[in-house]
Image (cartoon, rainbow, N blue to C red):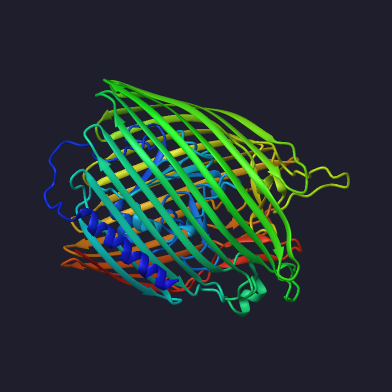
Amino acid sequence: MTKYFLLTLTTLFSIGQALTQDTSQVNNAKYLDEIIIIYQALKRTPVTFQNIYSKDIKQKSTGQEPSFLLSETPSITNYSDAGNSQGYSYYRLRGIDQTRINTTFDGMPMNEPEDQGAYFSNYPDILNSVSKIQIQRGVGTTKNGVASYGGSVQLFSPNLSDTTKTTFGLGYGSFNRLRVFGKYNTGIKNKKALYVRASHIYSDGYKYHSSNNSQSVFLSGGLFYDKSTWKLNVLAGHQQNEMAWIGVTDSLINIDRRINGNSKQEKDRFFQVLTQLQNHWQINQSSSLQSSVYYTFLKGNYDFDLNNFLGMASTIELYNYAVQSNFFGFFSNYTFSKNRFKLTTGLHGIIYNRQHTGSEKALGQLYQNNGYKNEKSVFTKADYKFKWFMFFADFQYRYVNFDYKGSVAMQKLDWSFINPKAGLSAATNPNSTLYYSVGYTGREPTRNDMFGGNDDLLADSSGKAILFNTKPEYVLNHELGFRFQKSKINFGTNLYYMDFKNEIVLDGKFGPNGLALTNNVEQSFRTGIELSVNYKISRHFSLVNNSSFNYSRIKEQKETFNPILTPPVIINQEVVFSKNNFTIALLGRYQHQSFIDFANEEKVNGYFLLNSRASYSFKGILFSVFLNNITNTKYFNQGYVDFDGSKRYFVQAPTNFYASIQYSF
C-alpha cells in the first residue's frame, strides 16, 4: 500500500505543477473569492455556536481523529477504541451520541444515512485539509442530511485563494505512531486554483493488536469568474484496523491495562470516496444561487469472533460483515439580501442504497440484504435587522423513507418532519450580542435502532419482520446566550434546556455488529451552562477556557435517573505562551464521573488530564512536540455493563508523545 501512496502523491503534485505552469502573472480581473456556505451561523445569529479557525487546527493537528480536537470545546466527551488518538474514536455532545449529530463538509452530509454515524476514520488526516470548523450546539440552523438533534459539526474545505505553498510533513510518536504527508496549493492564478494533499498514517495502537494503517488523498480545484465560481472536491480514504471495540473487565485491566477485548483474528478494511461539485452564481447585487451535487461510495468489511464476544475461547469460527453503499445527493439554495433583510430558501434530496453481506470463514455466505433510504427536504430562513435587534426564523420540511430487501419481507417505512426555529438577538454595541432561540426538530430511528443491533432482519414464528423501534424522537430546544468580543477577549456563555419526547437513548450495551444499542424513554430533558473564554493577559500570555455544567434526567416507568455517559462537569483550561516564532501551551482537562447503566449503579470515574504542546518555526521549517497525559493518569472514559452483568471499560493511553517537522516553501 505504501508504494501506491507514494505513487499517488507524486502524481498529484505533478498534476498541480502542470496545471499552474506559465501562470506566474496573476489575472487581476474581478472574481468571486470562494464558495459561500450559507448554513453556518454568523456573529449575530441567535444560536449557540463556536468556530475553530485554521490557525488553531494547524497548530493542534497531528493526524489525530477529529473527536480529540472537538473535545476541547464545551460539552463534548470522546474516547477511542485503541486507547490512542488514531483509528476508531467517538464523541458525544451534551451526552448525545454522534449518530444524532449532523456532520457536513461544505454543506454535504457526511452522516451515513442508514445508521446516521459520521466515520472520520475512513478519511484519515482529514483535519489537514479543513480550513474551519463550526460547532453548533443544540438544534441550531437548518442543515442538509440527518437532524441536528444534539448539535452539528460543519467542516469547510481548504481556501483555494490562499497563497501558493508546498508543505511536506513527517511525524513520529508513542506506539509506533507515524504520519507523513505532502500538500500543495497553487493559489488563484488565471482564474484557476488547485489544492492537493496525500497522507499516510500508521499506529500500533495502545492496546495489543489494535493497529491502524491508513491513507488518504484530497483534491480540490476551482474556477473563478466574474459572477460564477465552480469548485470540485474529491476526498478518498483507505484504512485497515485491528479491532478493539469490545470493552475489558476491570479485573483484567488490573492485570494488564493494554489487554484488548477483541481477538487477534478480528480486522477491518474500508475504502470510502466522496466527490462534490459546487457552483455559486451571483445573479445580481442582491441575489445569488448556490448548488451542489455529490456522490459517496463506500466498500469494506470487518471480522467478528462470536465465541470471543460470548466470553468463550476463540476457535477457527470467524464471521465477516461486508457493506457496499452508494450515496447520491443534490442541494440548491437561493439567497436574496437587501438592506436589513435576508432570505434564503433551499431544497435537498438524496438517493441511497447499501448492501449488507454476512458470511462465515468455513460456511461461506450466510445472507445478503439491501437497505434503501431516500430523503427530500425544503427550508426557508430569514433574518431582519432593526436597530439593535435581529429577528430570525427558520422553517424546514423533511420527508424520509426506508425500504429493505432480504429474506424477510418488510413494509416500507416513512416519516415526515416539520422543524421550525426562531430567535432574537440584540447588539447594543459592535462587541456584544445577547440572544435567545427556540427550535423544534424530529429524527427518525436508525436501522440499528429498528433491527435491534442485528445486521440481518429477524422474523417471528409467523415469518413477520421483528422491528424493535420505528417511532421518531423529538426535541424542543431553548438557548439563551451572550457573546462578547474585543481585542483582548472573546467570551461566550449560554444556558440551554432540551425537552425530549420518545428519546432514543443509549442503554450502555453493544450488539454483535459492534454498534451501540438503544432504548426509548418516556420523558427526558437535558439542561446546563456552557462557557467559552479566550483572554489575552499580555502580549505573550493567553488563557483559554471551555467548560460545561450539565443537569440531565430521564423518567421511565415512574423511575427517575441520569442518562449514561453524561458527566455533569467538564472543564478545559489552557495556558498559552507565544513569543516570536515560539509557542508553548499547557492544557488541563477535568471530566466528572458518569454512569454507564440505566440503574445508575455503575460508572466511569472522573479524571484529570494534563497535556502540553510546543512549536518553533524557522525559515519555513516548523518543529512541534506534543506530550499527552503528563501525570500518567490511569483512566477510562467509556464503559458498559455486558449481558452477563460484568462491567467493561475502554482504557485510554498513559503518558505519550508525538514529534513532527514540517517544511513549507
Q: Nearer the viewer, residue 581 or 459?
A: 459
Q: Nearer the viewer, residue 72 or 562?
A: 72
| Quarter where residue 493 is shown | top left
Residue in view at x 36 percent, y 40 percent = 278
Q: Is residue 183 left or right of residue 479?
A: left
Q: Nearer the viewer, residue 251 or 510?
A: 510
Query: In this rendering, does residue 146 appear at all?
Result: yes
Q: How many marks overall?
A: 0
Image coordinates of residue 346 in percent, x first then y, are 43, 28
190 lies above or below 209: above
Image coordinates of residue 237 in percent, x first then y, are 45, 59
Q: Is residue 82 left or right of residue 130?
A: right
Q: Nearer the viewer, residue 22 or 267?
A: 22
Residue in view at x 20 percent, y 59 percent = 540
Residue in view at x 55 percent, y 65 percent = 269
| Quarter where residue 262 is shown | bottom right
Residue in view at x 50 percent, y 72 percent = 205
| Quarter where residue 174 is shown | bottom left
Q: Is residue 366 left or right of residue 381?
A: right
Location of the N terminus by quadrant is: bottom left
179 lies above or below 300: below
Location of the C terminus by quadrant is: bottom left
Query: In this rendering, does residue 109 appear at all?
Result: no
Q: Is residue 164 left or right of residue 468?
A: left
Q: Residue furthest bottom?
A: 255
Image coordinates of residue 468 in percent, x first then y, are 74, 44
6 lies above or below 344: below
Image coordinates of residue 18 in percent, x first then y, are 23, 57
Q: Residue furthest right?
A: 461
